[in-house]
């Protein structure tokens, strides 16, 4: 009687009935006992090896729902070290007042669902978490994620429009192992840098996606004086800020200011002045760095884009992968999880 | 030119012959051979006589190397070659023919059902034949990619063993997920 239970699903689908189905069960049982070659019993390591070739969409929607063993293999830590949500952006509209975006309710719900399924399978194994620059998390998304990624080492979160100060601080407190963060320019940096400085003892790497002024630089100097790697690529960068960074971050080893719009800001009402090359003071101060990346070349496409966009690069206008690139190898985001498999084009989906 | 013969015994006690050079495609066999503890016949308790000839066929084709046609193709059209002074166009052509032939062979070789795939995968894993394992992983992945759980179960003859409650929960999740972006 146990047997008919086990195979009931298949009997229905093949439309056997009565005695015929009993015979079929016996045959099937015999075959199984003899060979035990069932994909439900496949070696977990081999299943993981197969599943490694898939992205998060296939893992969460298809493969994990096949059977228990496959679901278990889907939970393998190897598959979840990096959770790349760079494939999704919110369904949003830009608005003129804070938080400067409006996101549809269904888009928020879908993001929550996606996080629930993915983080459920990940079993806390995520060490690198990547979000798209147009994926606007709410506090509840962020906290839900933070609570389920206790081992996080790297966070790429370029859009903070809807995240409150208390939520991001709470998340950072949950991420004691955090070493690297990619963040947008915000109005006030001190609270977040202070929280990182206090909670994340191994923090070493920061990337800012947006304008960098002297206030940012002095906040870094105050709260994260031991920073080792800093990327400001494609930002409007005040000369004073750069000098301050070079003077005060004594542990800094790697600095990337490629394609930055370097500006000098004199006392008002004098207008800001765009510098076309690095002066000797900067070069001399930067010479102590292990790696220093700069590019201020009119023939460089990224430098041109910075100029066209007047110092605030509009990533959505350009190739989908372009924001993920960085001259610093440890900050550049691997692409193999996307596109390559699906035909070479990175297709970002709207959470509508 | 004759090479040393190795004898392999399947789990159901059947013995198969293979050249030593071919056997070296398997890391496991290579270690046994090099370890010098070769006592006439190597017993393979995890490989049946149904699948062992298929494994041997692969090893024969690949002799000493461990890669699939892909890797050989990459190595074959190595860019560095172009700057070498003794770069041989004929050699390059022969290499291309060889790679094409190997690809065709792989295609025919890999034409089998999920049961054979299952056995071959386990055998390749057990015998550490990386090229063969890669090929089988690729085939299994192609039977999964872009398919719904039902379609995958059908392809691999899998019974869903989730409880009705779990099934229901997953259906709920699926309902909330718009198919448009879950599977397009």
Image (cartoon, rainbow, N blue to C red):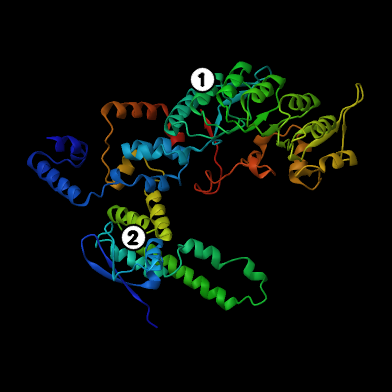
Name the mark on residue A219: none
Q: Quadrant of residue B173?
A: top left
Categorize mark 1 by other alpha carbons within 10 Å: few (<14), some (14-19), many (20+): few
Distance from label 1 to label 2 (Cα)? 49 Å
Residue B98 horizontal/vertical position (percent): 47, 72
Residue A291 shows in the view: yes
Q: Provide the chain ID for the residue under circle 2.
A: B
Residue drawn at (73%, 38%) of the image: A233
Residue B40 horizontal/vertical position (percent): 29, 71
Residue tagged 2: B111
Residue tagged 1: A105
As drawn, the residue found furthest toward the bottom would be B1
Label 1 sits on a secondary structure element that is helix
Q: B151 or B115, which lies in front?
A: B115
Asked if labels 1 and 2 share a chain, the reply is no
Residue B65 horizontal/vertical position (percent): 46, 67
Residue B82 horizontal/vertical position (percent): 65, 70
């Amino acid at each position: 009687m146990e047997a008919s239970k086990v195979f009931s699903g298949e009997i229905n689908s093949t439309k056997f009935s009565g005695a015929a189905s009993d015979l079929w069960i016996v045959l099937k049982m015999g075959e199984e006992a003899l060979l035990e070659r069932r994909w439900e019993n496949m070696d977990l390591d081999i299943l993981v090896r197969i599943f490694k070739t898939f992205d998060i969409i296939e893992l969460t929607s298809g493969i994990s729902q096949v059977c228990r063993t496959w679901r278990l293999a889907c939970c393998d830590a190897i598959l979840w070290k990096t959770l790349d949500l760079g494939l999704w952006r919110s369904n949003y509209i830009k608005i003129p007042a804070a938080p400067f975006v409006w996101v549809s309710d269904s888009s928020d719900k879908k993001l929550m669902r996606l996080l629930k399924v993915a983080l459920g399978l990940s079993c806390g194994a995520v060490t690198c978490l990547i979000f798209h620059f147009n994926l606007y998390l709410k506090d509840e998304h962020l906290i839900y994620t933070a609570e389920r990624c206790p081992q996080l080492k790297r966070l790429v979160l370029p859009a903070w429009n809807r995240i409150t100060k208390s939520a991001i601080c709470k998340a950072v407190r949950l991420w004691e192992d955090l070493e690297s963060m990619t963040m947008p320019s915000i109005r006030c940096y001190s609270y977040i840098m202070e929280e990182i400085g206090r909670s994340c003892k191994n923090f070493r790497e920061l990337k800012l996606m947006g304008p960098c002024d002297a206030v940012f630089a002095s906040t870094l100097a105050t709260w994260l004086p031991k920073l080792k790697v800093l990327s400001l690529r494609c930002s409007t960068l005040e000369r004073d800020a750069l000098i301050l960074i070079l003077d005060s971050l004594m542990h800094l080893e790697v600095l990337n200011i490629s394609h930055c719009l370097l500006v000098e800001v004199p006392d008002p009402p004098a207008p800001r002045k765009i510098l076309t090359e690095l002066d000797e003071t900067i070069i001399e101060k930067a010479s102590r760095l292990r790696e220093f990346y700069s590019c201020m070349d009119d023939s460089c496409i990224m430098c041109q884009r910075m100029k066209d966009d007047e110092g605030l690069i509009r990533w959505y206008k350009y190739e989908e992968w372009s924001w993920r690139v960085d001259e610093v190898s440890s900050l550049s985001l691997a692409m193999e999880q996307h596109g390559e498999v699906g035909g070479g084009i990175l297709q970002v989906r709207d959470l509508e | 030119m004759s090479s040393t013969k190795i004898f392999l015994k399947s789990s159901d006690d059947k013995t198969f012959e293979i050249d030593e050079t071919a056997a070296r495609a398997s890391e496991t066999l290579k270690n046994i051979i090099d370890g010098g503890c070769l006592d006439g016949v190597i017993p393979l308790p995890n490989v049946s006589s149904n699948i062992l000839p298929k494994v041997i066929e692969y090893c024969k084709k690949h002799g000493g190397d461990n890669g699939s046609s892909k890797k050989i193709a990459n190595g074959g059209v190595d860019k560095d070659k172009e700057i070498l002074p003794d770069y041989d166009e004929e050699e390059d052509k022969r290499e291309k023919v060889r790679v094409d032939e190997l690809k065709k062979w792989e295609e025919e070789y890999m034409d089998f059902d999920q049961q054979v795939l299952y056995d071959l995968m386990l055998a390749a894993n057990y015998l550490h034949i990386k090229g063969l394992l890669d090929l089988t992983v690729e085939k299994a992945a192609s039977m999964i990619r872009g398919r719904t759980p039902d379609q995958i179960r059908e392809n691999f003859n899998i019974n869903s063993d989730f409880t009705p409650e779990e099934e229901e929960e997953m259906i709920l999740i699926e309902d909330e997920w718009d198919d448009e972006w879950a599977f397009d």
